[in-house]
Image (cartoon, rainbow, N blue to C red):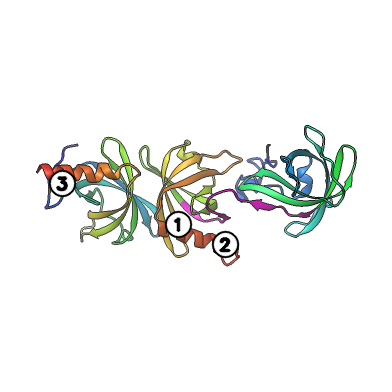
Amino acid sequence: MALLRPQASAADPAALLHPPVPAPPDEVADLVGWTLAAQMPGHDEAPVDVVVDDAWDRPAAASTAPCSLRVRAAGATLPEVAAGVEVDLSWAALGGRQRLAATVVEVADDSWELHAGWPPSRVQERRYHRAEARMATWLTRLAATPLTALTRTVDLGAGGLAVERLPALGLVPGEAVAVVLVLPDGPLVATATVVDPGTPQRPARIAFELITTADQDRLMGLVHQVEHGRLW
Amino acid sequence: MPLQEGRPGTVALSVPVWLVGVVAERGWVGTGRTRDVRAGGVALELDEPAPAGVEEGAALVLVVDWGERHRHLARVARIDRGRRAVALMILKPESGHDQVWDGAVAAALAAG
């Protein structure tokens, strides 16, 4: 499922102010036409794929607000449910799966109307939790002539990080790099592997390879601080 | 990869190395050659004096070109006044290559 927002053109000054990294939709209207997985707690059946036909009560940005969605089955028919049943909606997005808890408020022959709280929460499936943080990062290619470039993190954790794409380095998947981060309590040096060099719409993803346990502990502490709003 | 007896407990070895570290909160890449190696460590000569910031205790990525490139996480153990001779302690050898490192050194010392 493509999750790309319209990108600013190169001539658009906004493209210079904001890195061309797609973000998950922050408005419920953006979900129209998407396929989501719907799971009903207490039902043993596998999640049913639903398509969002309509979405309204567009919430204000950065606030919690109710929203309404009308969904229909993407393939087979919708399971029979009564009004009041709770449904978990989830979809793949940058940085992990997004989850929206919803309640069925109206059941029609081929669709449900759902009420949900907005914004969605992020479901993390990684071994190490990540936090969104923008920090200067130096990457050095190790497989060929040393070449270093400065970039910024998109998110980071004890297992790796996502950084703004670095076309100048010409990274390829599986390539070894050295990562230099300057954390609030001092620098961190590690080796890492390029998982995904990224695209203009997607950040590069990098997994740590050689990192000391002490530095992993520092990163976990940093993630904890960021998540609790004590930094940035 | 010619191995010769070096200082006591070490094996003389001269192969290219790179160091990647942090200087003044920025990434730094240095190049040089190993002078001798021992189990868990290496002494090397940098092509250029290490800048201020590469100090004893600093963590670095050490890339050794033994014919194939091996990456290790290392810490500066000693740095001389001229800032070109540096001794490193291997903190974390590249997976599977600690035996190459320590094994080669131990074998050469035993043979000597």
Magenta stretch holds residue A73:
no
Residue A34 can be seen in this image: no
Q: CA distance from mark 2 to mark 1?
A: 15 Å
Does A156 appear above or below A76? below
Q: Could you tell me which chain the residue with mark 1 belongs to? A: A
Give the image location of residue A41, x and y in percent.
74, 49
Give the image location of residue A161, x and y in percent.
51, 49
Query: Mark 2 is on which residue type?
Result: Val
Q: Secondary structure at mark 3?
A: strand
Image quadrant for the C terminus of chain A? bottom right
Residue closest to the far left = B112
Does A167 appear above or below A135? above
Please identify the quarter of the rendering in which residue A12 is found.
Answer: top right
Kindly identify which residue carries mark 3: B11
Kindly identify which residue carries mark 1: A216
Residue closest to the far bottom = A230
Give the image location of residue A20, x and y in percent.
61, 44
Magenta stretch holds residue A128:
yes
Residue closest to the far top = A75
Q: Are marks 3 and 2 on the same chain?
A: no
At 52% across and 44% down in the image, what residue appears?
A205
Q: CA distance from mark 1 to mark 3?
A: 33 Å
